[in-house]
């Protein structure tokens, strides 16, 4: 297989769960897809000749590193736990600011390679070349193997353990709205830590596992099927690889209808493959609400099938919340939010989403309680302020709304004036109220 035959990485797309002011729009996407494809391309591009041959045993040094990569470190001391928190904060800041050098300094690309190319890959063809390609590709782009997290607003929520390894839970909130959660798996390095792997809550799997399994599906030889089956993956033939390439190209060009036609023409067994499923999901998300709702039913059907394709794990509630809002099934949306809260260990942002759900149920007191709790837990979470403003305007409690504006000014120094609400139909009545007129005089006063 030549590098020119390989599918390009999927483009950036709108991210996971958005909670707009009116609580009526939710978009979903999974970051790990693009990451895995990028790493896969680097691996396959390193294979000059698609021929099978048993590779000699890897050097003992590599074996030792592999063992270290899969063996959890000793329990952390109090000092190390503090260092892990500092590592998480530093990584979150570097990713938010798109600081390529800083991000790469916090990545353990050798450790990730050791986790991908473990004992299960000993039967892969040209495994040594594959590993070289992986190593080169994992750090080639800005942000290394965390490239698709670069530029999002990222916050390290807490440190904990996953599979015995130190882990940092990151919340990802891109500029165009949304939220996603990943664990960064780390191990001690000197006096600090380095990122070893990434666990994606949506898939309930590690980046290293997804990469290894996808490599197995695309091995260019008849023996790939056995290896893929061993790893629990469905084998691709050359035609499917070509279709994945074509689908990625169509997505990059913005031909979402073309992507949908391609995915819908796939054999059933490949249509349910994670890569094609998420490619189709991205297209449906882009088409949802267009052409007089022509694609809305297909989008809902795809969301309903997510648990069967991605696995019956409560993290698929990140996708299903969208479906529940579309169906105006607020009770199920609330249940999904609570299940996600339980899985990730709690996040103030999800409390805001929960508050918006209670608001839509007309439970204004319950909504205010949740929004207040969210801001107490995370004072600079302006989504909580936004939720309270919307609650007050729906209540038509304009005196309380004015007090919210004063409180926001005291906390942030920012004045929300007429221009701030001019384009929001919900606030039209408030802008002509005596309460707002008095507030404008208050703002104008020296």
Image (tube, helix red, strand yellow):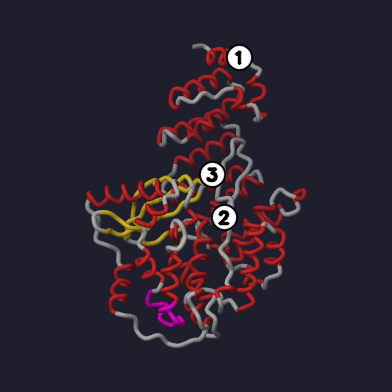
Which region of the structure is painted magenta? 118-129
Q: Residue at x 44, y 22 (%)?
A: 410
- Does 358 sit above or below residue 104? above
Circle 2 packing at 10 Å, graded few (<14), some (14-19), many (20+), is some
Q: Which residue is mark 2?
A: 12
- Dot 3 falls on a residue whose secondary structure is loop
Q: Residue at x 67, y 62 (%)?
A: 250
50 vs 358, nearest the viewer: 50
Q: Which residue is mark 1?
A: 437
Q: Nearer the viewer, mark 1 or mark 2?
A: 2
Q: Position of residue 199 (x, y in %)?
A: 43, 59
Residue 256 picture quarter? bottom right
Q: Residue at x 53, y 75 (%)?
A: 217
Q: Position of residue 271 (x, y in %)?
A: 64, 68
Q: Are marks 1 and 2 in contact (CB under 8 Å)?
A: no
Circle 3 packing at 10 Å, graded few (<14), some (14-19), many (20+), is few
Q: Distance from label 3 to label 1 (Cα)? A: 33 Å
Per the rendering, the mark at residue 175 is 3
219 vs 337, nearest the viewer: 219
Circle 1 packing at 10 Å, graded few (<14), some (14-19), many (20+), is some
38 vs 263, nearest the viewer: 38
The answer to if 51 sits in the magenta stretch is no
């Amino acid at each position: 297989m030549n590098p020119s035959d390989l599918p390009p990485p999927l483009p950036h797309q709108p991210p996971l769960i958005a909670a707009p002011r009116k609580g009526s729009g939710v978009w979903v996407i999974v970051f790990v897809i693009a990451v895995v494809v990028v790493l896969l391309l680097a691996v396959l591009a390193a294979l000059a000749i698609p021929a099978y041959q048993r590779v000699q045993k890897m050097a003992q040094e590599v074996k030792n590193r592999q063992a270290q990569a899969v063996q959890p470190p000793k329990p952390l001391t109090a000092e190390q736990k503090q260092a892990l928190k500092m590592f998480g904060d530093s990584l979150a800041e570097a990713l938010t600011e798109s600081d390529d050098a800083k991000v790469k300094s916090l990545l353990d690309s050798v450790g990730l390679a050791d986790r991908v190319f473990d004992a299960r890959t000993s039967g892969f063809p040209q495994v040594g070349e594959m590993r070289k390609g992986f190593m080169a590709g994992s750090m080639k782009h800005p942000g290394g193997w965390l490239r698709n997290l670069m530029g999002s607003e990222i916050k390290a929520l807490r440190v904990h353990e996953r599979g015995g390894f130190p882990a940092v839970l990151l919340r990802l909130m891109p500029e165009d709205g949304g939220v996603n959660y990943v664990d960064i798996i780390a191990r001690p390095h000197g006096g600090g830590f380095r990122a070893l792997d990434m666990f994606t809550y949506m898939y309930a799997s590690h980046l290293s596992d997804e990469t290894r399994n996808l490599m197995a599906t695309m091995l260019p030889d008849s023996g790939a099927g056995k290896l893929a089956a061993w790893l629990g993956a469905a084998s691709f033939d050359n035609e499917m690889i070509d279709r994945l390439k074509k689908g990625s190209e169509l997505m990059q060009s913005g031909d979402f209808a073309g992507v949908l036609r391609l995915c819908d023409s796939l054999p059933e067994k490949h249509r349910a493959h994670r890569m094609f499923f998420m490619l189709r999901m991205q297209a449906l998300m882009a088409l949802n609400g267009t052409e007089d709702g022509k694609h809305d039913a297909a989008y809902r059907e795809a969301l309903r099938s997510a648990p069967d394709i991605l696995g019956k794990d409560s993290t698929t509630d990140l996708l299903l919340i969208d479906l529940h809002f579309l169906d105006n099934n607020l009770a199920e949306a609330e249940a999904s939010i609570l299940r996600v809260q339980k899985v990730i260990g709690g996040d103030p942002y999800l409390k805001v989403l929960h508050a918006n759900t209670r608001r839509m149920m007309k439970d204004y007191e319950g909504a205010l309680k949740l929004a207040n709790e969210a801001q107490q837990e995370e004072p600079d979470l302006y989504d909580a302020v936004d939720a309270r403003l919307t609650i007050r305007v729906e209540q038509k409690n304009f005196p309380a709304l004015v007090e919210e504006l004063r409180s926001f000014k005291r906390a942030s120094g920012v004045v929300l004036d007429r221009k701030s609400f001019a384009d929001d139909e919900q606030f039209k009545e408030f802008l002509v109220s005596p309460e707002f007129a008095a507030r404008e005089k208050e703002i104008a006063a020296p």
